[in-house]
Amino acid sequence: MIFFQFKKQHWTVEGPDWKHLHEALDKYAKAIAEAADKLAERINLLGGLPISDPSKFSRVAYTRFEGEDKLDLRAMLENDLHAEQTTIQTLRERIRLAQDNNDYGTDELLKDILEDHEEVAHELDHYLKDMSLEETLKR
């Protein structure tokens, strides 16, 4: 769901820093799409069947979509940071499960994906630091 959230925000972001955020949000969404493809390939390699039914994605997602409403910039980024934090925690749990089952390939893949999500969370945290975005937009 966070993929769709990033894409929605990529399309609707406004303000003085819109171009930078527009590009960053698209970069985050693309990284998630690439990670999903790698995970699907891994599932297939292990004899499983990756989810392909769009209606199932919302039922198994780690986070909930923020909705169709257009939100202010701070609210969007706060939603993203919360979703990233939830995803990071869940990935850590999945890594432990892979390790417990001696699934070294999945362990390594999930660690790479975890690092990407940690970087995104770090960037989002920086966007939300110091001066409020509302104050920045008023200047």
Image (cartoon, grey):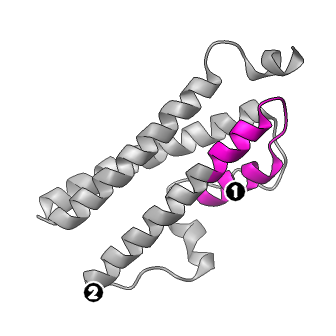
Q: Is residue 5 magenta?
A: yes
Q: Residue at x 81, y 15 (%)?
A: 135
Front-most of residues 56 and 122? 122
Give residue 46's position: percent from left, percent from top: 25, 81
Front-most of residues 74 and 21? 21
What's the magenta region?
Answer: 1-26
Give residue 84's position: percent from left, percent from top: 51, 43
Left or right: residue 76 compared with residue 63: right
Give residue 34's position: percent from left, percent from top: 48, 64
Left or right: residue 39 compared with residue 17: left
Q: Is residue 102 magenta?
A: no
Front-most of residues 28 and 64? 28
Residue occupied by mark 1: 7
The answer to whether residue 61 is seen in the rendering is no
Give residue 137's position: percent from left, percent from top: 84, 22
Task: Characterize the local packing of mark 2: few (<14), some (14-19) or many (20 or more) Cα atoms within 10 angstroms.
Answer: few
Q: Quadrant of residue 99?
A: bottom left
> Could you tell me which secondary element the residue under label 1 belongs to?
helix
Query: Please, what is the dominant secondary structure of the magenta stretch?
Result: helix
Count of all numbered marks drawn on residues in the image: 2
Residue occupied by mark 2: 47
**Three-letter residue code for mark 2:** Gly
Q: Quadrant of residue 39?
A: bottom left
> Could you tell me which secondary element the residue under label 2 belongs to?
loop
Q: Residue at x 65, y 52 (%)?
A: 26
Left or right: residue 67 compared with residue 28: right
Q: Quadrant of residue 18?
A: top right
